[in-house]
Image (cartoon, rainbow, N blue to C red):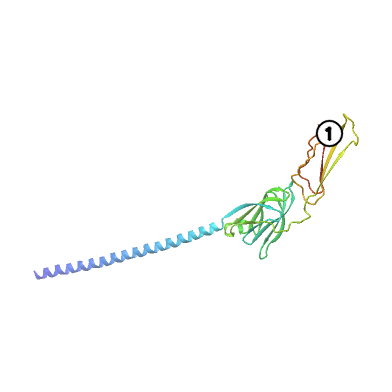
């Protein structure tokens, strides 16, 4: 009887030890799983941060553009780049001249631009520089210019010309009126010629001719009121002719 009890106690002790060992093993397995989960979480967080950082870098490198209307001497500034409109060589052929430079050196170039032809500087917008395009030549003193750039360069702005206005670049109009007859009789027709000439060095614009009507004894036959071009370049002239009946 005693021998049987000892066997039962021994067996029970063995089972208790096995249960204790199994519990320790399960605890270690759970601990390993927790550590593995924490490691995976840390790696995932680091990976997401790296991806977001790469996305931020990509956003900074995104190429965008702005259009500006420039007059002669006006310029576009962005970061350390400057693009100044020097002159309009030809409205008809679509040619404008720009001076492009970078503060600190490395770029200082005057280039003739064909309308709607992109011009790259310092590698162009795709490589961290700038791309300029004259998209529209408005007249002989202004043009619309597009600048393409990476957003990391900042925001471009327009700067008005700081050149002093030359006193010589002004129009000077003269008006002459002539008649084809110095003496007239009742019923005679006379031809009147009005000539306007720009003797200045600047372009004359918005010209309006105010020709006073003759005496009430005269009647108009044709061509009145006289019509003159509303724009005259330096040295250019225009004439109008009308007929009167005495």
Question: Quadrant where the C terminus lies?
Answer: top right
Return the x and y of residue 128 as percentages of the image width and height: 61, 59
**Crowdedness of circle 1 by 10 Å Cα count: few (<14), some, many (20+)?**
some
Is 202 in front, or is 97? 202
In-image side of 132 versus 55 (left or right):
right
Which quadrant holds residue 167? bottom right
Return the x and y of residue 90 as percentages of the image width and height: 75, 49
In-image side of 26 versus 88 (left or right):
left
In-image side of 183 versus 66 (left or right):
right
Question: Quadrant where the N terminus lies?
Answer: bottom left
In-image side of 244 versus 32 (left or right):
right
**Residue sitting at 20 percent across and 67 percent down?**
16
Residue lying furthest left: 1
Is 211 in front, or is 28? 211
Residue lying furthest right: 183
Return the x and y of residue 102 as percentages of the image width and height: 66, 62
Residue lying furthest top: 187
Judged from the image, the secondary structure of the residue bearing numbered disc 1 is strand
Return the x and y of residue 152 as percentages of the image width and height: 57, 59
**Residue sitting at 86 percent across and 35 percent down?**
191
Q: In the rendered image of this protein, does residue 221 appear above or below residue 38?
A: above
Q: What residue is pinned by disc 1?
A: 243
Which quadrant holds residue 125? bottom right
């Amino acid at each position: 009887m005693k021998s049987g009890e000892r066997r039962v106690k021994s067996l029970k002790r063995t089972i208790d030890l096995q249960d204790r060992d199994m519990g320790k093993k399960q605890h270690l397995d759970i601990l390993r799983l927790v550590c593995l989960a924490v490691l995976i979480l840390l790696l995932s967080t680091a990976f997401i941060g790296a991806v977001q950082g790469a996305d931020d870098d990509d956003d900074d490198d995104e190429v965008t553009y702005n259009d500006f209307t420039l007059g002669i001497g006006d310029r576009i500034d962005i970061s350390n780049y400057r693009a100044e409109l020097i002159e309009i060589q030809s409205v008809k052929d679509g040619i404008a001249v720009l001076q492009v430079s970078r503060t600190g050196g490395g770029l200082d170039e005057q280039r003739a631009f064909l309308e709607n032809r992109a011009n790259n500087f310092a590698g162009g917008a795709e490589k961290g520089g700038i791309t300029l395009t004259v998209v529209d030549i408005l007249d002989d003193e202004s043009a619309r210019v597009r600048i393409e750039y990476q957003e990391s360069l900042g925001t471009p702005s327009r700067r008005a010309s700081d050149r002093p206005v030359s006193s010589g670049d002004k129009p000077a109009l003269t008006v002459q009126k002539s008649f084809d007859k110095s003496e007239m009789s009742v019923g005679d027709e006379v031809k009147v010629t009005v000539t306007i000439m720009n003797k200045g060095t600047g372009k004359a614009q918005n010209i309006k001719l105010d020709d006073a009507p003759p005496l009430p004894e005269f009647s108009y036959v044709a061509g009145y009121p006289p019509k003159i071009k509303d724009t005259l370049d330096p040295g250019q002239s225009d004439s109008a002719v009308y007929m009167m009946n005495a």
